[in-house]
Amino acid sequence: MDFVTLALLFVIVIILALIIRGSRRSLPPPPDKYELGDVTLEALRFYNGYDWSKPPLVAIRGKVYDVSNKYDVYGPGKPKSAYTGREIARALALESINEKDFTADLTGLTAEQLERLEQSVQEFERLHDHVGQVVPLRKFTAEELARHDGTDNSLPLYLSIKGTVYDITKGKQFYGPDGVYPFAGKEVARAFALFSTELEDCNDNLEGLSYTELENLRDWIGKFNSKYPIVGRLVLS
Ligand code: HEM
């Protein structure tokens, strides 16, 4: 090999090394792991891939996995889209996408079906991040809800819309002791429908409201379902 060929080869190797280094540097950083924490089965339903602010999630025996890295399988309209936002232990064991099998109840399953579930769980452990766990829906009396109005700093802020209790702690600037809205610790369906901040409208009585006012309420419910976790139901004491 003469000197010119050697020099040419050397230059090519250097250029290739620079290109490879450059392309490595320009790789985007891996996305942060999503952290959900505690979630009720009711709130999990909103993680079904249709709300772009939330990743699609599934629960298996209460353990919640982020399946957004398999969009081609779990994304909206994709083959297993029905699984997202649901507890699917029984469905996996039965290889079912039937609504009635979206449960952690394994009663009556055969050894073979249970084995299939175990294999699926291993696959989920391998492929997907564990991001939270299912917790039971809490039941609140009006008195219990009222304790979450921000006066006790150690408690999260909650409010109820038509009996569905939301954790609104991340909206502290609106609802906390220094916030402008007096809704924390209260049932607010009527106030939201009427765009009222009067305490006398903080109840769930929808009598006499117009279509537009009920539509306002539906808009608020949509906003809250998208923004705040559902933590429980308000029950009459
Ligand atoms: C002059 C009248 C009002 C103005 C200019 C106003 C303005 C605003 C603004 C700028 C926000 C922040 C929005 C965001 O960052 O997402 C907000 C939030 C909010 N407003 Fe009002 N508002 C008014 C009256 C009312 C009334 C009468 C109600 C009664 C239902 C109300 C209920 C709320 C609630 C509940 C939030 C917080 C929503 C959340 O948690 O994200 N507002 N308002």
Image: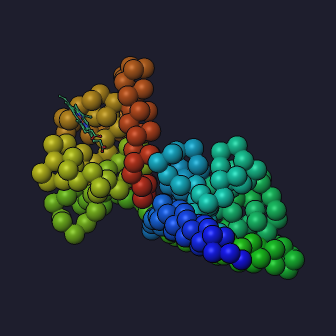
Quadrant holding the C terminus: bottom left
Residue 90, by quadrant, is: bottom right
Residue 58, by quadrant, is: bottom right
Quadrant holding the N terminus: bottom right
Query: Residue 93 location, x and y as percent?
Result: 79, 69
Q: Which of 18/7 is in front?
A: 7
Vertical order, 1 against 79 (above or below):
below
Task: Point out the residue furthest to the left here.
Answer: 178
Q: How is the image coloured?
A: rainbow
The residue drawn where x is 49% and y is 52% is: 54
Q: Is residue 179 visible?
A: yes
Going by the image, does 236 lie left or right of 107? left
Going by the image, does 174 lie left or right of 128? left
Q: Which of 112/20 is in front?
A: 20
The residue drawn where x is 27% and y is 51% is: 171
The residue drawn where x is 59% and y is 72% is: 7
The residue drawn where x is 75% and y is 62% is: 91
Query: Residue 109 location, x and y as percent?
Result: 82, 73
Callout count: 0
Vertical order, 221 against 104 (above or below):
above
Q: Is residue 142 visible?
A: no
Tell me which image quadrant ligand 1 sits in. Answer: top left
Going by the image, does 67 lie left or right of 160? right
